[in-house]
Image (tube, rainbow, N blue to C red):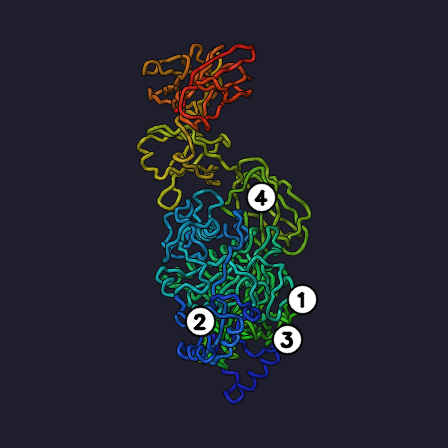
């Protein structure tokens, strides 16, 4: 262990209360405004209309509430909140009655009922490298989330989705239909990558379940624990809300009840809006979290970063209603904060698994997971912490390293107690960072300040006694104040505190935690520390496959400030080739136009004597897998060749994941009947193998669903009102095809008309020079080199020779279209009834002309057609 704990008591009980009160007043003057008297009515209800609706009530007792209703002569329906029995629901109140009820001594708080939640956008354009997830998959391949369960609270996801199948737990409540948004969120969290590269999630070994976002209160704790849920993702919102209501209170209380359960919320996609209530009302661009449940203290809210690493304009910002830091983290989210939250949920699963491997399968406290995620984040936005990006961009690799290195402490503390933990800082550390997180008891709904227990974190250098306090932000309700950079000081509003020190001298340091205000018992907490040292490549890493000939985002971290030279080389070649000069090393990323070659490659950055080389990775191209043919008992798939020495790994879909099927040097695979029986469903994929390293998998295709026929891609007639019939045949493949024969149905059996052998092309025009008048039926017989015979679908052709007319169907049902086929492109058509009355006359175009029979009675009619040459053709037709 790298830390040592010391305990001592700093003050005695007689002075404790006085000192506590003084420190509280001083600090709140800096971080926020003085608390006001708690309102018992949710802010959104203070300007409500008389429209009846349903409200949530927190009361001292139902009997006392009913006494108030009788006293105020209020007739309303009162019933228990189904998921939270300690709350009540009431409906049938107007605005005046609502205000009267708020004055009732039995009422502790009146809140809104369920609002209509909305999914907070999604775009299937994930980039897991932005949060260093491919590096985790490469360096810790055993960490895939196995044995853990994540819940996706919104609408149901599709459990049969290719990337989720075989790893879902049925929801407690059945629901009709599935949501594409929820399916995408579940894929970000734990997609297996079966559908293709974009289907791979953060924790593909985890299981998934869903619950409904229509109920905004937490799911029953027992229900979540019974399903084994340790992380629940919430990628939805209800509009900007700035207060601590019954939903926020319920989430905080649930985490106290189930301390290993982590709730991850999207911050929202209302980053440019201004709240309508609270002390930050009317300030655009701040305090616009989309839902009071996101104001909870013991959850984790996540904002979104754009592809260039900047804060997304739509990403909802903090502070929380009382000045606390929100969101705490950001993650890549080109499509919005929904996907950013899902990415962080997936990383949390990996942290939980890494912890379990070291603690006999025990789950960590969610406060520790939260502390690890915050402490390992990369600083973005303004230095240290801000209300846009929180404590930074989630870094999966740093989080896993922190966990596996056991750079954390879980303890508990009493009022007035101080605990000291000694850590040894090695030489060459660029930055020392420590984060303190505790699960704070739920506050009363409507409180102006949510924090109940207040702990203090500080860093002390043992040799000199110098002390560094955590970073705090100005929470004063003015835009310029909210944009001020963080400064060091005492934090009196957050249950997350972080202290950092740039370029610390090597030696012993002390992390000090003090129980500044612990109202009862002992307060558990999690303390995490990291040493940021060497620069390193974060993407590509060993096992990565970049796309040759296209722009790829490459990422590094930890380079000193300055302009660098960026280069690449083909493995085995000592010559480095220039990518760019003057690259800003502190941007940590570059869009590289990769060369159009298939090879193992390295990239490097160099500046001022510092050289940073990447692992060897692959440049290759995505392989489009094509179904050549799908015949009874035999299927052929093929793909383009990348290079002469490339091998190809073909995969089949197993119970939950793609599994290797065959390793080939050829670019096609023929599957026989026995192999096909083992494919259920019939999904296949292929990946190149270069120098023994497997590249990017193709998009999976299903030979049973892709519409692939047995050799015949299409077989259609193109000319049938002439002296001959012409049929066009397109083959999907000629592999092992020995001959093809055009056949026509004559006297009940098919007879050959024309044969082609060998079959060296895929497109043919097949002619019948002497078709019969009327309906002709054709098919193509295909014979393989091994003697197998396959047939196309029959193609019917109604033939009319030159100077002839064919009317069909005859007889025709009234209302059914009547067709006239003749060789004249343009003709005048007349319809005459049996009494000689002209019912229709008109000019019709095309070789096949259509006549309506909608107004015709049953009986016999005459069709008279005058061709372009003046020929008159007459045909009887029977209408039924």
**At numbered mark 2, what does the secondary structure look like: helix, strand or loop?**
loop
Reply above or below: 50 against 563. below
Report if the CB atoms under discs 2 and 3 are less than 8 Å apart. Answer: no
Labels 1, 4: front one: 1
- What residue is disc 2 on? 76
**At numbered mark 1, what does the secondary structure look like: helix, strand or loop?**
helix
Report if the CB atoms under discs 3 and 1 are less than 8 Å apart. Answer: no
Question: 780 or 845, which is in the foreground?
Answer: 845
> In the image, what residue occupies the spot 40% across and 42% down?
658
**At numbered mark 4, what does the secondary structure look like: helix, strand or loop?**
strand
Q: Quadrant of residue 83?
A: bottom left
Quadrant location of the C terminus in the rendered image: top left
> In the image, what residue occupies the spot 50% across and 52% down?
133
Reply above or below: 543 against 686. below
Q: CA distance from mark 1 to mark 2?
A: 43 Å
Looking at this view, name the residue that lies furthest to the bottom.
Answer: 14
Question: Which label was assigned to residue 30?
Answer: 3
**Residue neighbourhood size for the residue with mark 2, other residues' Cα within 10 Å, grouped as few (<14), some (14–19), many (≥20):** some
* Res 140 seen here: no
Residue 730: x and y, percent?
46, 23
Mark positioned earlier in the residue sequence (4 or 3) = 3
Q: CA distance from mark 2 to mark 3?
A: 45 Å
Residue 801: x and y, percent?
46, 11
Looking at this view, name the residue that lies furthest to the front.
Answer: 835
- What residue is disc 1 on? 479
Question: 841 or 150, which is in the foreground?
Answer: 841
- What residue is disc 4 on? 552
């Amino acid at each position: 262990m790298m830390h040592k704990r010391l305990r001592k008591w700093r003050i005695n009980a007689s002075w404790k209360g006085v000192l506590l009160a003084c420190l509280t007043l001083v600090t709140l003057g800096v971080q926020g405004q003085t608390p006001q008297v708690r309102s018992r009515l949710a802010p959104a209800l203070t300007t409500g209309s008389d429209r009846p609706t349903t409200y949530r009530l927190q009361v001292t007792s139902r009997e006392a509430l009913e006494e108030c209703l009788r006293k105020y002569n209020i007739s309303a329906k009162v019933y228990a909140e189904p998921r939270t029995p300690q709350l009540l629901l009431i409906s049938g109140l107007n605005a005046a009655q609502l205000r009267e009820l708020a004055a009732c001594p039995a009422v502790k708080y009146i809140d809104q009922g369920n609002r209509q939640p909305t999914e907070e956008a999604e775009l299937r354009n994930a980039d897991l490298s932005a949060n260093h997830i491919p590096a985790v998959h490469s360096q810790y391949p055993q960490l895939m989330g196995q044995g853990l369960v994540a819940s996706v609270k919104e609408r149901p996801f599709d459990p049969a989705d290719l990337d989720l199948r075989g790893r879902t737990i049925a929801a407690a409540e059945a629901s009709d239909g599935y949501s594409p948004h929820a399916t995408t969120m579940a894929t970000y969290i734990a997609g297996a990558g079966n559908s293709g590269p974009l289907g791979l999630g953060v924790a593909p070994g985890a299981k998934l379940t869903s619950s409904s976002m229509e109920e905004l209160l937490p799911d029953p704790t027992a229900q979540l624990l019974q399903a084994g849920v340790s992380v629940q993702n919430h990628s939805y919102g209800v509009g900007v809300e700035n207060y601590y209501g019954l939903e926020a209170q319920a989430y905080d209380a649930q985490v106290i009840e189930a301390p290993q359960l982590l709730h991850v919320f999207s911050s929202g996609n209302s980053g440019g809006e201004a709240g309508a209530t609270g002390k930050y009302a009317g300030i655009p661009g701040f305090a616009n979290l989309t839902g009071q449940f996101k104001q909870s203290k013991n959850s984790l809210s996540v904002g979104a970063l754009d592809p260039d690493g900047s804060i997304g304009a739509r990403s909802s910002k903090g502070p929380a209603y009382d000045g606390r830091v929100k969101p705490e983290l950001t993650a890549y989210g080109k499509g919005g904060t929904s996907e950013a939250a899902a990415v962080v949920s997936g990383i949390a699963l990996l942290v939980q698994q890494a912890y379990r491997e070291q603690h006999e399968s025990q789950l960590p406290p969610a406060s520790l997971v939260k502390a690890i995620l915050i402490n390992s984040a990369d600083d973005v936005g303004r230095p240290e912490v801000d209300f846009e990006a929180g404590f930074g961009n989630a870094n999966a690799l740093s989080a896993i390293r922190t966990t596996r290195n056991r750079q954390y402490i879980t303890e508990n503390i009493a009022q007035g107690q101080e605990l000291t933990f000694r850590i040894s800082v090695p030489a060459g550390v660029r930055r020392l960072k420590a984060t303190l997180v505790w699960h704070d008891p739920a506050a009363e709904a409507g409180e102006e300040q949510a924090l109940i227990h207040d702990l203090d974190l500080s860093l002390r250098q043992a040799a000199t006694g110098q002390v560094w306090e955590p970073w705090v932000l100005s929470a004063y309700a003015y835009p310029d104040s909210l944009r001020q950079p963080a400064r060091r000081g005492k934090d009196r509003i957050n249950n997350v505190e972080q202290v950092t020190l740039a370029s610390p001298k090597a030696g012993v340091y002390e992390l000090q935690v003090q129980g500044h205000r612990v109202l009862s018992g002992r307060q558990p907490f999690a303390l995490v520390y990291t040493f940021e040292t060497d620069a390193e490549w974060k993407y590509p890493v060993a096992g990565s496959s970049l796309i040759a000939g296209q722009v790829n985002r490459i990422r590094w971290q930890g380079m000193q400030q300055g302009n660098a030279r960026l280069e690449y080389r083909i493995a085995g070649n000592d010559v480095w080739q220039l990518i760019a000069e003057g690259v800003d090393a502190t941007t940590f990323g570059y869009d590289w136009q990769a060369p159009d070659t298939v090879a193992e490659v390295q990239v490097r950055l160099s500046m001022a004597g510092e050289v940073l080389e990447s692992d060897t990775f692959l440049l290759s191209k995505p392989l489009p897998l094509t179904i050549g043919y799908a015949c009874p008992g035999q299927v052929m798939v093929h793909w383009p060749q990348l290079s002469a020495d490339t091998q190809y790994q073909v995969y089949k879909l197993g119970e939950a994941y793609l599994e290797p099927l065959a390793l080939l040097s050829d670019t096609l695979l023929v599957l026989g009947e026995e192999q096909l029986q083992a494919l259920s469903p019939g999904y296949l994929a292929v990946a190149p193998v270069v120098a023994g390293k497997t590249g990017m998998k193709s998009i999976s295709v299903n030979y049973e669903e892709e519409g692939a026929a047995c050799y015949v891609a299409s077989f259609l007639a193109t000319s049938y009102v002439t002296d001959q019939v012409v049929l066009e045949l397109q083959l999907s493949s000629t592999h092992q095809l020995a001959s093809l024969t055009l056949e026509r149905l004559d006297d009940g059996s098919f007879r050959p008309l024309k044969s082609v052998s060998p079959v060296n092309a895929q497109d043919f025009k097949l002619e019948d020079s002497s078709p019969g008048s009327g309906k002709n039926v054709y098919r193509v017989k295909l014979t393989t080199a091994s003697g197998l015979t396959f047939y196309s679908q029959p193609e019917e052709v109604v033939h009319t020779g030159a100077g002839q007319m064919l009317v069909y169907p005859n007889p025709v049902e009234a209302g059914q279209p009547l067709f006239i086929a003749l060789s004249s492109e343009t003709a005048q058509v007349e319809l005459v009834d049996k009494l000689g009355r002209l019912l229709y006359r008109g000019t019709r175009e095309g070789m096949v002309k259509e006549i309506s029979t909608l107004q015709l009675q049953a009986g016999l009619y005459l069709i008279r057609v005058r061709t372009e040459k003046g020929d008159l053709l007459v045909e009887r037709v029977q209408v039924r």
